[in-house]
Structure formats: structure tokens, C-alpha cells
Image (spheres, rainbow, N blue to C red):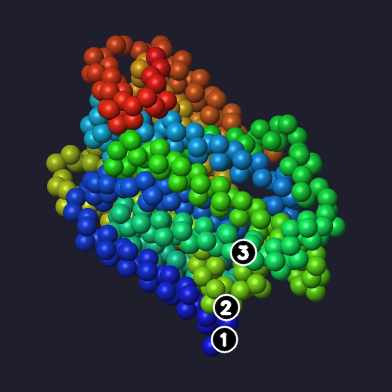
Amino acid sequence: MSDQNYQLLALLIYLTAMLAIGGWAYLRTTDLGDYMLGGRGLGPMVSALSAGASDMSGWLLLGLPGAIYAAGLVEGWIAVGLTVGAWLNWKYVAPRLRTYTEVAGDSITVPSFLENRLKDTSRLLRVASGSIILLFFTFYVSSGMVAGGVFFESSFGSGYHLGMLIVTGVVVAYTLFGGFLAVSYTDFVQGTIMLVALIMVPVVGVFATGGLGETAASIRAVDPDRLSLLAGATGLGVVSAAAWGLGYFGQPHIIVRFMALRSAGEAASARRIGIGWMLISLFGAVGTALVGIAYFEQHPEASLSDPEAIFIALGQILFHPLVAGILLAAVLAAIMSTISSQLLVTSSALVEDLYKAVLRTDASDRQLVMLGRLAVLGVSVIAAALAWQKSGTVLELVAYAWAGFGASFGPVILLSLYWRKLTATGALAGLVTGAVTVIAWGNVEALSSRMYEILPGFVLSAIVTVVVSLLTYRPDPRIEAEFDEAIRLLDRDAPASPEKVAVG
């Protein structure tokens, strides 16, 4: 059997397993709550790894190792910011959001939570939130499909369109039929594959390059600054890179995992598992890049045309073709886990936050689940059409998406959980301010080249939300009662925990 056939066999096994999980989840999905939120029955292990896998995407195995391979550890400040942001998100958002979404009308999406929490009868907040999610995630899904096509094209020499359709077809199938359970459990498996792969490659690579001492010496021979976190860095650059961590507070496809926990008390266990997975994975990605620098310095006859392919290249050099195929599956897992999560959140925005809230409120659960599946299919078709030409514009919008969600939803989510005086008008103003600031800032080269747009977007959104809320605040006994009830339930599930501190 040829090397490529071994690798294709490994990928076939992986893709079949993902479809099998989708079929299993389909049999356990009976109503809209199951389809969109898994019946709030996720344990901490599945919640943590599914959140991590849906978060990191191909950036973990391709983007981060490629950046560090090309420029050194100075590119690692984004990873530092993301780790801190993820820990804070699990610590202070997860337990309270799990409790508050249940208290506030048993909300199953972020827009429905904001509407129920703030008693917005105009439906403007819910429609605006759903529209922002729909817009950004359609392009975000499209970029994942582009990555899938490029993956097959570069790994197997197949056509870009064939690779894109294979990835799209499998992801759409298990997401469409299995809903949230399928997405969460496939993410769990994919997160496990990613973790194992990111341990194997740098560990075996260190032995191949002669041990830690020889590896470090080879890196210094290329450029001593590659091992420095500060060489070539500026204070503004470090702050801008670390500001990526702010994005976590507003990512709908991540915080929906918090809403699906069995109880707020399990957030602490999930946090430890999730941050442990994240740290090991990030160290593995960094280690892969550094080992790659050493390996190609020691073997000048070998060449690497694309720094972002360093993980794939080392996998094919260091391992048997079947194992290399499993490592390729890890890259595919990173891409697919994010696409599926984004598809489901986009579907929920269409069905729960636009159709059900605005057009029809008397649809049955069976009809809504069917509409949810049709929404997954519809969004996938639009995203695939956008990805068909590998448009650079689509790929550039990915940078806006993380910043856009973080800057628009982030301050509003935090204030909705910890500040009694937040109003629907203030939240709406903050959402719009964050999204507009990110898009405007990101399109001005003189600004975006100096500072990542999430930082000004987050700060301005927070200021506008607070100021407008103070100007429009009117006491509402229902909001006060639910705020107190959320704290009471949090106290019950997590006694003596910092998560239960109330503000305002």
C-alpha cells in the first residue's frame, strides 16, 4: 500500500466515525431544546473539550506553528492572551451564564437570553443580535470550507473543490441530523485527536533533532532571537496581541457550551479540564514550530515552502504513513470542529431568534427542529458558494469575526451577568458600537496595523453600553427578582465561590 493510501485510509476511518456520532445523536434529538442545546445535559469533560476544539480551529495546528516557525516566540503573545481570556471566561462567565439563562425564560441562545434578561418587548435587541451572528458566521463558515479545500489540495493533490465538498458534506451531515449533541461529541473526539497529535509531533521531533540541547542550539544557529518572547516586540504590539483574549467573552459558539452544562457547579471541573487541554495543546503547537526550525536547519536538503504546513511536514517525515494520516486527521478535525459549531449557532439564530421570535411563535417543536436542519443546509449552501472561488475577502473577514463578536457581545454579556442596571437600549447601542468599530477600524490600514481592532471596539462598546444604560435605566421588579434568583441558584450550586459575587 502506498504512503498516500495509508493516509487516505486513516482519514476515511476518521470521517466515518464523525458520521456515526451524528447518527447516534440523531436518535437522541427529539425537540428544539435537544437540537440547539443538547437538553442542557453536557458533562464537564465534553463541555471543556468541545469548547476548546470549536474555539481553536486550524489556527492551532497551522496558523500558530507557522507564525512561530517564521518569526519565533514573539508571535506567542496571542496564545498568552487567549489562555488568560479562556480561563477568565470559564471562571466568571460560565457558571453564572448557565444559571441565568435557565432563570431568564430557559433561554437556549445568546440573543434570546439578552431579550429575556432585559425584558425587551420591542424584539429589536434579539433581531439585531441574531443578525450579527448570521452575518459574521456565514462568512466564518465559508472560510472553514476554504481551509478544508486547501487542506485536501495541499495534502493529496486533489482538486480544491472536491476537498471542499468532502469536508462540507461530512460536517453538514452530522450537524444537520445530530444537532448540538453531534457537534459537541464530535468536537470532543476531535479535541482529543488534536491533543494527542500535538504531543506526539514535538516529542518525537526532539529525539529526531538530537535532544533538547541540540534542538536549542540548532534554533540559535538560525536566529538567536527565535527563542525570545520580546525580541522585535513593542509594548503596543504585545498589548494588541494579548487583547485577543477579550474575544472569548462574546463568542456565541463557545459560550453556548456554558449554557449546556448540567449545572453551574460543574463549571469549575470543566474549567480545569479545558484550560489543561488548552495549555498542553498550545505548548505542543509552539514545540512543533521550534522543532521544525531545528529539523530543517539540520537537514538543509529538505525544504518547506509554506511555514503553516510545518505540522503536516513533520508528521509525514517522522511517522509511518498510517500515523501521518492520523495527524492529518487532527488538522481536519480542527477545521471541522469549528465549522460545525458555527453552523449550529447560525441555524439557531435563524430559527430561534429570527423566525420564531419575529415571524411565527406558534410553530411546534417538530417543525422548529426541521427548520433548524433546513437552516444548516441553507447556510452551508451560501457559505460554499462564497468559498467556491477562494476569495481573499472572505478569509479576511475571519479576522473581523473574532473581534466583531468579542467587541459587540463581550461587554454586553459581562454586564448582563454582573450589573443590574443594564438596559435593553444600552445593550443594543453597545452591540452596534462594537460591531461598527471593529469593521471600521479593521478597514483602515493605518489603524489596524498598529492595534488589533478588538481592543478599541471592546472599550467603546463597554463605554456606550454603560452610558446609555444609565441614561435609560428604570427599575423593573421582574429583572431584580431574576437577578437575585440567579445569584441564589449560583450559591446553591457553587457555595463560597468567587463566581457568585454580584455587582451593582
Q: Is residue 293 visible?
A: no
Looking at the rendered structure, the kind of residue marked 2 is Pro
Would you say the residues marked 1 and 2 are in contact, meaning their CB atoms lie under 8 Å apart? yes
Q: Relative to the observer, which residue lies in front, 96 or 36?
A: 96
Q: Name the residue rendered at 61%, 55% in the picture.
A: 284
Q: Can you identify the residue that label 3 sits on?
A: 201
Q: Residue 133: image x %, image y %?
A: 40, 42
Question: For numbered disc 3, what is the local secondary structure?
Answer: helix
Query: Is residue 298 placed above or below 115 in the rendered structure?
Result: below
Q: Residue 5: image x %, image y %?
A: 52, 82
Q: Residue 487: image x %, image y %?
A: 31, 23
Q: With 182 as the anchor, is 305 left or right in this view?
A: right
Packing grade of label 3 (10 A; few <14, some 14-19, many >=20) is many
Q: Outermost residue, right direction?
A: 221
Q: Can you identify the residue that label 1 sits on?
A: 2
Q: Name the residue rendered at 79%, 41% in the picture.
A: 232
Looking at the rendered structure, the kind of residue marked 3 is Val
Instruction: Give the CA separation, mark 3 to mark 1.
Output: 22 Å
Q: Image quarter for residue 382?
A: bottom left
Q: Name the residue rendered at 46%, 58% in the picture.
A: 192
- The residue mark sitting in front, 1 or 2, is 2
Q: Name the residue rendered at 43%, 70% in the picture.
A: 14
Instruction: Give the CA separation, mark 2 to mark 3.
Output: 14 Å
Along the polypeptide, which appears first: circle 2 or circle 3? 3
Q: Can you identify the residue that label 2 sits on?
A: 321
Q: With 405 as the anchor, is 44 left or right in this view?
A: left
Q: How many marks?
A: 3
Q: Residue 250: image x %, image y %?
A: 45, 36
Q: Relative to the observer, which residue lies in front, 356 or 185?
A: 185
Locate the N terminus by quadrant.
Answer: bottom right
Locate the C terminus by quadrant.
Answer: top left
